[in-house]
Image (cartoon, rainbow, N blue to C red):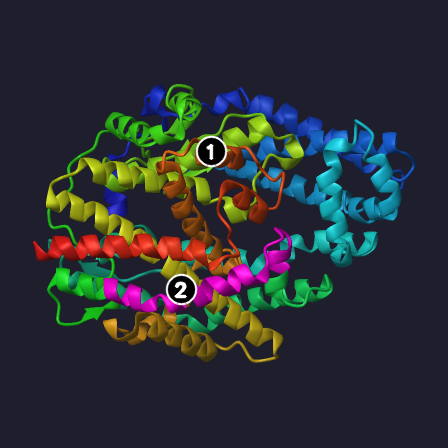
Amino acid sequence: MTENEKKQQHLPNRADVPQELKWNVESVFADDAAWEAAFAKAEQLLPEVAAYESRLSDSAEQLAAYLARREELLLALDKLFLYAQMKRDEDNANPTYQGLADRAQSLAVKTSAALAFEDPEFLSIGEECLTEWLQKPELAVYRRFFNELLRQQPHIRNTAEEEILALAGEVCAAPRNIFSMFNNADIKFPTVQNEQGDEVEITHGNYLRLMESNNRKVRRAAFDGIYATYAASKNTIAAMLAANVKKNVFAAKVRRYDSALAAALFGEAIPAAVYDNLIVGVRANLPLFQRYLELRRRALGLDKLHLYDVYVPLAKETPRDIPYNEAVETVLAALQPLGEEYIRVAKTAFTDGWVDVVENRGKTSGAYSTGVYGTKPFILLNYQHNLNSVFTLAHELGHSMHSYFSHKNQPYIYADYEIFVAEVASTVNENLLLRYLLNKEKDPEQRLLLVNHYLDDFRGTVFRQTMFAEFEKLIHAAAEAGEALSCQYFQKTYYQLNLDYFGEAVAVDAAIDMEWARIPHFYRSFYVYKYATGMSAATALAQNILSGDPAKLKAYLNFLGGGASKSPIDLLKDAGVDMESPTTLERAMQSFREMCDELESLLNQ
């Protein structure tokens, strides 16, 4: 029996979890019957909305009527998805809610295909006529929406082609779906001996815990075991990744972008310089990264640091148990610099059913924030009574508060902020929590725990994700140049990046040339760089907030309420952070440097 199976035996069933520790999903739909009624209504609404085809250019009034009905349909779909997702994630062993989620997905695909006419028809109205119509009160709110559409006009195809592209959506999702099934259902990892000498099967869930083991033999066995397993299927996985890359290249060509990277950046109006400057800036700071790795080697007392040594905690003292109520109090205290309104709303998260707190049998692992326009935000946790869970709570609350203020201050069409800024508010909260705890903590071992948490988080979010981003850029450029995306190519390219980033500070183990094979984010192409840019922006914003300058705090709160009312770059610029300037990344690197100094000081005590 695996550790996970033993753990599941001791977990409560969903029905046994106290109500006060569950989220209030009934505020979305009272029950399944209400969901079914809403689904039936959405199915009826779809042909009514689709019936506007070929009529959008008739008049401003007709266009406004279509947009209102369209919004009604899309909001209904959002709520259908939300309820199905939340109920499914409460207990994945319950097939009812997987079925609801599948039905919602199918309806979304039908909707996308049925409304494929809209962009070409919007554009057929003509810029001059649209400009005139947008002066009318019922259409004025859509000004940015149509300006964005006009910006995207060179990449929008005719109605028939758009319908084909919409219908191809599920086919284009195949590489990601196949990898997900392979990685989550079919792959089987070996067993290793844990610190107690028990045979434990490696799983996705326990791999990191094994890599955090104080026993180096356990870490190495887990490291070798997981990569040997991926290596056994390396050609199959390489074919999956190559297919995903080629799908991106195909989509970029069909929509007349210069490259797959340009296509990925265009939607959020992110200048290519932001992506390129991140890689250049991080590479310029690799000596700082390697300094941290050398301090880690010293702290662990090793002759040479290996890649299976980079996750083990440096603090030797076992962290104390932190009850959930104490975590809530700590997070709220740490976020006080965000002001009275922020704290007032944040407190309601813990009294109004935002948070699903404890792990139960069948519940989705990890943590996330969700919610749609017109509902409260929701947070899925699996609280573990440790420091990491306290940071997770602060992080997810940051997402939910961002959603709350965006939904409160923006109309539906601009209520959801872009992915580029999605990790900013959450990481600001983590920064504020860290500074709060460091200001309180005097015990060297506990300070080491906090400093270690920050440095490892920064390593994983900025240095590691940037290396991933560089890998993605290289493999897409190779495909566009007509190079073969073989397994050998992926291995060679990825191994060289590890040599570049870790340098002489680490013995770069040969097995790492298969790490690309286990990264799900490579199937959400050109996404990972946003983690690094998000942390850079968040570091600067947290510094602004802690300065005590009311104008800087107001600028940040305005950012939280900005939704998608401007481009992400402009929203951040208004908040006091210029993502096109190297200064933003350098402010983050300076923070990392200061924490390295703190680590060195603690090691010298």
Question: In what element is the residue under mark 2?
Answer: helix
In the image, residue 30 above or below residue 286: above
Is residue 374 or residue 486 the one in the foreground? 374
Residue numbers of the magenta segment = 263-292
**Residue 517 in view of the camera:** no
Question: In what element is the residue under mark 1?
Answer: helix
In the image, residue 381 above or below residue 502: above
Q: Are marks 1 and 2 in contact (CB under 8 Å)?
A: no
Kindly identify the amino acid type of the residue bearing the numbered disc 1: Ala
Residue drawn at the location 13% of the way across and 72% of the way down: 303
Residue drawn at the location 14% of the way across and 54% of the way down: 601
Residue 427 sits inside the magenta stretch: no
Kindly identify the amino acid type of the residue bearing the numbered disc 2: Val
Relative placement, left or right, of 279 versus 214 is right
Question: For residue 65, what is the image quadrant?
Answer: top right
Is residue 415 or residue 114 the one in the foreground? 415
Q: Nearer the observer, disc 1 or disc 2?
A: 1
**Residue 298 in view of the camera:** yes
Q: Which residue, given by chain and number where applicable, does mark 2 sit on?
A: 282
Residue 269 sits inside the magenta stretch: yes
Residue drawn at the location 55% of the way across and 23% of the way down: 29
Q: Which residue, given by chain and number where applicable, does mark 1 sit on?
A: 551
Disc 1/disc 2 C-alpha distance (Å): 30 Å
| Residue 256 percent coordinates (x, y) | 73, 64
Dot 2, how many residues are within 10 Å of its Cα: few (below 14), some (14-19), or many (20+)? many
Q: Main secondary structure of the magenta part?
A: helix
